[in-house]
Amino acid sequence: MPQLLANAIVTSAIYVLVGLSFSLIYTTSRFFNFAHAGYIVVAPYVAYFLARNLGAGWLLAFVTGAIAGALTAIALDAFIFQLLVGRQSPSTAPLLASLGLFVVIQATIALVFGAASLSFGLGEGSIYEVLGARLTGVQGATIIAAIVGAAMVWLFLQRSTRGKLIRAVGCDRELAIAYGIDPVKVSLMATGVGAAMAGIVGCLSAADIGLTPTAGFQLLLGGVVAMVIGGVGSTPGLLLGAILVAAVEHGAQWWFSSAWDRLILFGILLLFLLFRPAGILGRSSRAASV
Amino acid sequence: MPYLLHLLILVAIYATLAVSLDLLVGHTGMVSLAHGAFFGIGAYAAALLAVRFGLPIWTGALIGMVGAGTCAFLVGFATARLRDDYFVIATFSLQLVFTNLCENLLSITRGPLGISGIPSLAMFEEIVAPQTQMLVIGLGFLGVVWLIVYRLAKSPFGRVLHAIREDDVLTRALGKDDRYFKSAAFAVSAAAAAGAGAIYASYTSYIDPSAFTITEAILVLSMVIIGGAGRTWGPVIGAAVLVLLPELLRLIGLPDAVASNVRQLLYGVALVGIVMLRPGGVVGWTNVHERVR
């Protein structure tokens, strides 16, 4: 039982980080960015390449990977999404483009690295006993990263000038422009920070359970379900949502079989979308409906 | 020659899917990622009713179409008031739930093992080759679906759909129940997709969950967007391009594992390129004013 709890905490830590990175970008760009699944896996693949083929240390590889992922995201945002948003094209245009990019990134990675699961060989290194549960070093780092990450993002958005810029553009793009804020610059900054976070969580998860080209998609699903259930734009809501999602996933695996966890998860998401689209802590139910 | 017929049948099936999805995406402005699921409902309904209960395959196809339509009407009614993004997420989760059910309801769908021995829709084997008959059936169904979507788009019903696409709040304010119209469009679209699924199942005689996944849903959506959403011939052309283009890769002689990734790469790039450079799709320039009519 303590082991089950520990596993659920690690999973929810991952979903918190994914959800935070996604919602940072979502705040300013306001569309469902499927390419985020790509941002999550670009970093660990770059890190894997650096560490395995060039002999870099894992920490250096992870940091470089996260930076590479952030630069990829910024480039895509600058040359594709911002143009579509600025052009006043139909609201679905950026979403469709992101679907295309998601497919492109996934296929490119599969072409270069193959579709097989890659192992970083870091999971078995050190095992700690905490309150009767066994955690690897990577899992411990994930939990710490989630706590620090959530606190830092909350402080960044609430206290720092740059964070306030992001919230201003997210609240009302037109008004932000009237106050002399360049929404494109702010969006690019949010994308950079969000994608770097996505890269870090991608590396952590890859070091824990291995890496496939579709891993980003699986992680993004959990993170987004947590975000929608908790309430889009609310950091405490995201924490709550991530814990709920992880509890459902591990609970389902414990009591039924691992085959049904996704089904139950998406069933819950559908129920939330139908009856409370704003999520548990969301401000207004009008946010999600027409 | 059988290979060419095979390709044409695939084009007909996918064009049916694209045309039916276009009723939602192009005419009503609802981007749905659940089309793979309705395709699958039709295929599984026809296959299971035929293999398990010995019903004639066309009966199974009809039941599947009615079932998918009903299902889509209810889902459409429940999700009609969700904003763009949230509607995409809802249909997307529906698609994942369907795939999960297919893979795990082992007692019914046999999971990844799939269902084999599905009877063919071709009935006059002595007179015409079965494959030729399947092509006639596929093209015939495509024609019917195309005509229905075409006539619907020109009808008063279609004008309300177009109004919803431009501004659904305004449409509601003008006294049209947008929920009803959205759900009805969703139902028609899903029923057509289920019909295509039944034809697919009877043609390949074997189905497994991998043919009805989110990848499939994205592929069909790409066909609509690349061909030209809301254009008369757009989805058909998009389907033809995306089915036939990867076959060129096979002619070059790429191994299958590489070819499937290159194929994905191609349609991803095409999707981004079209959205960026020619939002009306490849046929966009031929009839610019059609959208206004």
Image: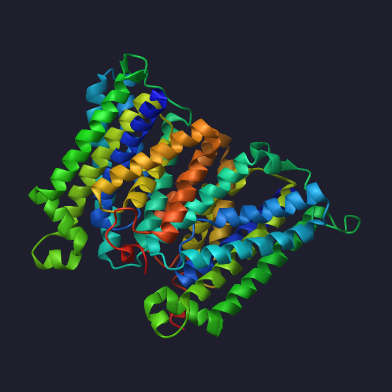
Q: Position of residue B49 (x, y in %)?
A: 77, 52
Residue in the image at 62% along x and 44% along y: B102
State which quadrant residue A275 falls in: bottom left
From this view, report whether residue A148 is shown above or below residue B12.
above
Residue in the image at 36% along x and 50% along y: A229
Asked if residue B100 lies left or right of residue A232, the reply is right
Quarter of the N terminus of chain A within the rendering? top left
Quarter of the C terminus of chain A within the rendering? bottom left
Asked if residue A173 lies left or right of residue B30, the reply is left
From this view, report whether residue A210 is shown above or below residue B222.
above
Residue B234 visible in image: no
Q: Position of residue A103 (x, y in %)?
A: 43, 46
Residue in the image at 63% along x and 74% along y: B148
Q: Position of residue B239 (x, y in %)?
A: 57, 59
B159 or A97: nearer the viewer? B159
State which quadrant residue B199 falls in: bottom right
B224 or B132: nearer the viewer? B224
Total numbered labels placed on residues in the image: 0
Residue in the image at 54% along x and 54% along y: B242
Asked if residue A146 lies left or right of residue B3, the reply is left
Residue A12 visible in image: yes
Colour mapping: rainbow
Q: Position of residue A244 (x, y in %)?
A: 38, 42
The residue lying furthest to the right in this view is B126
